[in-house]
Image: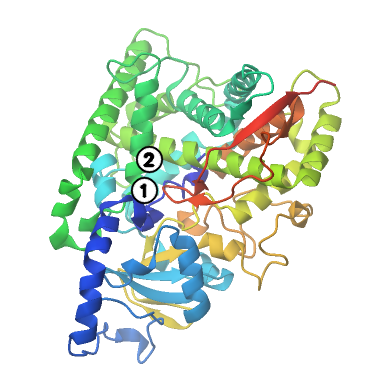
Amino acid sequence: MLATYTAMDVSSLFAVRHSPLFLLLALLVPLFSFLVVFSTKKKKKLPPPSSNGDQQLPPSPPGLPILGHLHLLGSLPHRNLRSLAEAHGPVMLLRLGRVPTVVASSAAAAQEAMKTRDLAYASRAHMLMADKLLYGQDMVLAPYGEYWRQARRVCVVHLLNPRRIRSFRRVREQEVAALLGLVRRSPPGGAVNLSDVITSYSNAVIRRAAFGDGDYWIDGDDGGEKLRKVLDDFEHLLGTATVGEFVPWLAWLDTLAGVNAKATRTFQALDGLLDRVIAVHRQRRLAGGRPVGDDGEDDRRDFVDVLLDVNESGEEAGGVHFDEIRIKAIMLDMFAAATDTTYTALEWAMAELINHPSEMHKLQDEIRAAVNGANHVNEDHLEQLRYLRAVIKESLRLHAPLPLLLPRETLEETELLGYRVPARTRVVINAWAIGRDPATWERADEFVPERFMDDPAEYGVVQDFSFVPFGAGRRGCPGAGFAAPSMELALASLLYHFDWELPNGTSKVDMREQFGISVRLKTPLHLVAKPWSP
């Protein structure tokens, strides 16, 4: 889940193609290119060295006036940034409009930023879209300080501890059964839109974990379609780069493109939904229907119940009180993080397995031997499935859900691989480039799950920083443990109950990417499911 907790990407800042910035670039790049040729050359004024003496800033590629390096990002910025790093080194300084941004593209740079000098890199930049959608009070994008520390503590201690994650086993197993039902209801021999099916599963798991088993819809909704649309808009907007973020005096383009109005509509719809959810939970608690809160595996409290317990207990540290606004902000963090990461990881894993049938058959043999003729896979089987975990890790290495980890911001002047990094500089870790670095990985661009067979570490545990899909350090993802059983149980069940193949006339899954809040397959994954029974 919050496997996207590092999650709810505002590496979205780089999703240029699907934002007003793309229009801006198309209109202004030719003009600025003309100005570069005919203007007088001026030496750029760099920040003063201060405490680091003569230490140099990281290298930069040539840029344009005003836009800086925005035009170099393209529609797949993680790939373009890796190409730039090959020419300019694993630490680069880009100027995205007015925003100085350091990009780290090696395991050594990631380790220094997320471990050795973690505190210096522990803050977040101010994000306009986050203010519009997340009340300016969420945990993921909060600047480093007492509120962030206490919000993270609440999430780790109360929402995402191992006991609470186990308490949602019933939810996961029921939603996997519903997932299999959707596949079985597809026309015999017809292709299943597995992307849609997996999205429904991911949404259902986090919705029930967050809100409980009640039905909560947007006003006027008839069956949840409007809710799904609003959540899609919410995630798309979080992945939208606004012009005002980079070039403030052109912020009016955001209004012209309708981005601000859409953000307002989406916020109002979700705010109304969350108000109703909290009101229903409060009414139930007053009526004596409050779930048992023993914090054990039979604990039936959802996230709203737990946060209301924190709110009503008056638990407070560092002067921080978790009122309803902060509860709602944290709930939206959960949705953005959990849904997109689980869905994306499952989709890429299935796509890789279809393109590598020997690996898929090896995994099916492991699953079917462990389940040993039972009616279904349950979470007790997962501990035996070493190859399943290796497949998911290898898929995450090749297709990190957030290829550009959430941008950090330096609290003070610091350094990175010997370069000076001024205070209040944004820092982006290119997890996608690190996961495919040929200096670290043999056959770096190939799908080889066996490389993880002897790796006992959990998904979110970082050892040598060559595999950082969930980030690390203070700003690492606290929700990897929530994501793991959701991904493993769904993938194991799909491969246990069905044999999978491509529709007629298709020889390979189209692996082209679409960049947004996470990187997805550009084309939905359509597969033919053939029921299997022991």
Q: Secondary structure at mark 1?
A: loop
Q: Residue furthest top?
A: 287
- Residue under the point 53% across and 60% down: 431
Real-space Cα distance between discs 1 and 2? Answer: 6 Å
Residue 494 % position (x, y)? 69, 29
Residue 68 % position (x, y)? 28, 73
Look at mark 1 in the image and give the residue it sits on: 239
Of residues 71 and 27, which is closer to you in this image? 27
Label drawn at residue 235: 2
Task: Judge from the rendering whether residue 37 lies leftward or rightward of residue 379; answer left or right.
Answer: left
Q: Could you tell me how many numbered marks the image carries?
A: 2
- Residue under the point 46% across and 68% down: 81
Answer with the quarter of the image where residue 509 lies: top right
Crowding at dot 1, Cα within 10 Å, few <14 / some 14-19 / many 20+, comes out as many
Of residues 363 and 515, which is closer to you in this image? 515
Residue 526 seen in the current view: yes
Residue 411 seen in the current view: no
Q: Residue furthest front?
A: 505
**Quarter of the figure that contains the C terminus:** top right
Residue 11 % position (x, y)? 40, 56
Task: Judge from the rendering whether residue 23 lies leftward or rightward of residue 122; answer left or right.
Answer: left
Q: Amino acid at mark 2?
A: Glu
The answer to whether the residue labelled 1 contacts the one labelled 2, judged by CB atoms less than 8 Å apart, is yes
Q: Amino acid at mark 1?
A: Gly
Residue 396 in the image: above or below residue 210: below
Answer with the quarter of the image where residue 45 lies: bottom left
